[in-house]
Amino acid sequence: MREVTELRYLILALQREGNRQLATDLRPLGLTPSQAETLGLLAEREPLTLNGLGEMLVCESGTNPSRIVDRLVSAGLVRRVPNPEDRRQVLLTLTDHGRELARQVVEVEQRLEDRLVALIGDRPVAPALTLLRDMAAQVPAGRALDRRRG
Amino acid sequence: MREVTELRYLILALQREGNRQLATDLRPLGLTPSQAETLGLLAEREPLTLNGLGEMLVCESGTNPSRIVDRLVSAGLVRRVPNPEDRRQVLLTLTDHGRELARQVVEVEQRLEDRLVALIGDRPVAPALTLLRDMAAQVPAGRALDRRRG
DNA sequence: TGACACTATATGTCGCGACATCTAATGTCA
DNA sequence: TGACATTAGATGTCGCGACATATAGTGTCA
């Protein structure tokens, strides 16, 4: 198998596994991984417009996350407030319940990431991180991450 | 941001982007990335049972891929033949059309991977590959890859 | 002002992907 | 042989995730 083919499938396999584990851990909170990412982002940066949110979500790069937000609104975690200064826009804010759940999400993510650290063991991570970072920087979904840093 | 958090999101971002590009390139063939993986695997190893196939698919680890196969059968690319020796099993084989399409899939994948190589440039890949390989080996979706090698 | 381009969001559609559940065929063992 | 577990596969459900399209509000410029 070509090295680059293997890289492609490894990335696929690890993404799937991470998502699966995260979904399992989030289930008690009634959230999916995408919803958790959205909630976490809002907790750090509210208020956000739908597009502003969409530009920073890795899970939904490109499209606007209106349907993920639908579910968070139905669950009473997020509010959609029309922006009076530009009535095309919707400003998203967390409800108290949403903020509380966002805190629990942080804990769940930490548990997942601790397991991930255990999986890595004492292997060097920096070279892999550098490579993946450089690759992602050239790609739309990756730039969502840059926006989150900046 | 914790290093391991970044790793998690980088893997997500790169998986999404790869899938998006592959989907675009496969669209002229009328195939999705999952269907392409299935077709390629069958081209190398037919006949396979549904479970046998499922164990080697990275895209659908755990569940059996009966619905992906549904679509390939409808498209006239795959045949489902009951195994006379164990009538619970179904043996999957490619039709001529399926085999032909599998060849075209190989070309599409090579184009994608050439772009991936360009993205990597002259950066070292081996350390990243080692890390990801070791991590995947400890995880179900990753073992699908091992089975494919072995 | 009025035509028209542009932007923000919403919505329809399709194929996953994970989970749970169902059915039929086979194996096991008293 | 007959009760019961096990296995292979099919199927129902839900929430994405990508794409295309629709709609309403805003900006631009003759």
Image: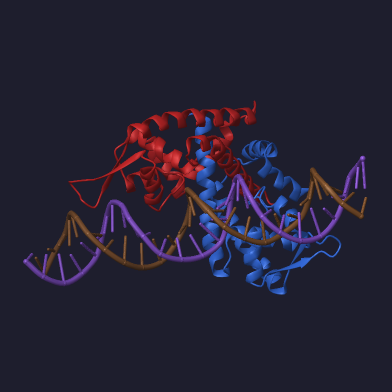
Chain colours: A red, B blue, C purple, D brown
Specify the quadrant of the image occupied by residue A13: top right
Residue at 73% x, 63% y is B43
Residue at 55% x, 28% y is A111
- Of B90 and A85, which appears nearest the observer? B90
Q: Is residue D12 left or right of residue B43?
A: left
**Residue A22, position in %: x, y?**
54, 37
**Residue C20, position in %: x, y?**
61, 46
What residue occupies the far top of the structure in this picture? A122
Quarter of the image for the N terminus of chain B: give it.
Answer: top left
**Residue B99, position in %: x, y?**
71, 69
Q: Is residue B45 visible?
A: no
**Residue B106, position in %: x, y?**
65, 62
Residue at 51% x, 62% y is B24
Rendered view: A110 above or below C30:
above
Q: Is residue B138 left or right of residue D16?
A: right
Q: Is residue B79 visible?
A: yes
Residue at 74% x, 54% y is B51
Rendered view: B107 above or below A106:
below
- Of B109 and A51, which appears nearest the observer? A51
